[in-house]
Amino acid sequence: MQQDIRNSLKGYQEENVELSANHSNKFEALLQSEMHQQKTKKKNYKWLSVAASIVLLISLAIKFYPTENATNIKDVETSSVQKEISLGSISPEFQTIETYYIKSIDLEISQLDLTEENKEIVDGYLFKIAELTKNYKSLTLELNTNGVNDSIIDALISNLQLRLQLLKRLQKQLKQLKNLNTKQNETQII
């Protein structure tokens, strides 16, 4: 490799470049101007950060400043919530029952497969469930006005059971409808 470089450089001659007469003067002037160049003055934005801090403090004070009306409203809401009796507030067993049925109902509703073909069926069932929900709320109101009564508690539990049964029946009908549509599509293909 060293021999290759030597071979390449055998015929090389350096070019003779001449600099102008005042080249050194030009270079020295350029160097002086670069070295003694004035730095640009930074603008002072300290007043802007102070103003932003003041605005932030004022907005936080407004946000968290307690008002008499807000505390009165919260007191009224908590007192009304404490006075209202529901099935779950009677005893821990009833709370477990109510929670089980409500979560099961919500789960069944979330698993519904709504399509254009089954929209009418689903709407009919959901209408019946909405009526039962209104009935459940009126039973809860009756529980609040008349007090704890075995017949009202039984009616509340029956209402929850009926809603869950309706949803399970709806799921079963939707599966049957889907299977029927699948069979029809298979026979049409054949």
Image (cartoon, helix red, strand yellow):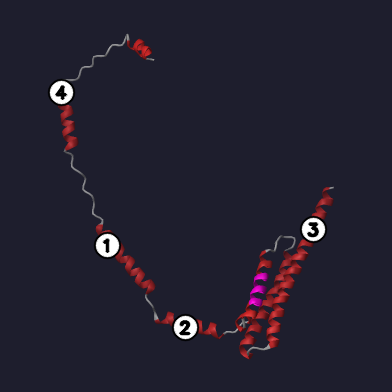
Q: Which mark is residue 22?
A: 4
User: Of callouts 3 and 2, which one flags the residue occurring earlier in the amino acid sequence?
Assistant: 2
User: Of callouts 1 and 2, which one flags the residue occurring earlier in the amino acid sequence?
Assistant: 1
User: Of callouts 2 and 4, which one flags the residue occurring earlier in the amino acid sequence?
Assistant: 4
Residue 148 spot, x, y in % from top left: 64, 88
Measure the alpha-carbon separation of dots 3 and 2: 55 Å
Amino acid of disc 1: Val
The correct choice, above or below, for 16 with respect to 101 in the image is above
Measure the alpha-carbon separation of dots 1 and 2: 39 Å
User: Of callouts 3 and 4, which one flags the residue occurring earlier in the amino acid sequence?
Assistant: 4
Residue count near mark 2 (Cα–Cα under 10 Å), binned few <14, some 14–19, many ≥20:
few
Amino acid of disc 2: Asp
Residue for point 18% across, 36% down? 35
Q: Which mark is residue 179?
A: 3
Residue count near mark 1 (Cα–Cα under 10 Å), binned few <14, some 14–19, many ≥20:
few
Q: Residue furthest bottom?
A: 146
Q: Is 93 or 50 nearer to us in this picture?
A: 93
Q: Which residues are magenta?
A: 96-105
User: Of callouts 3 and 1, which one flags the residue occurring earlier in the amino acid sequence?
Assistant: 1
Residue 32 spot, x, y in % from top left: 16, 34
Q: Which label sits in the foreground, 4 or 1?
A: 1
| Residue ID for mark 2 | 75
Residue for point 33% across, 65% down? 56
Q: Are marks 3 and 4 in contact (CB under 8 Å)?
A: no
| Residue ID for mark 1 | 50
Residue 44 spot, x, y in % from top left: 23, 54
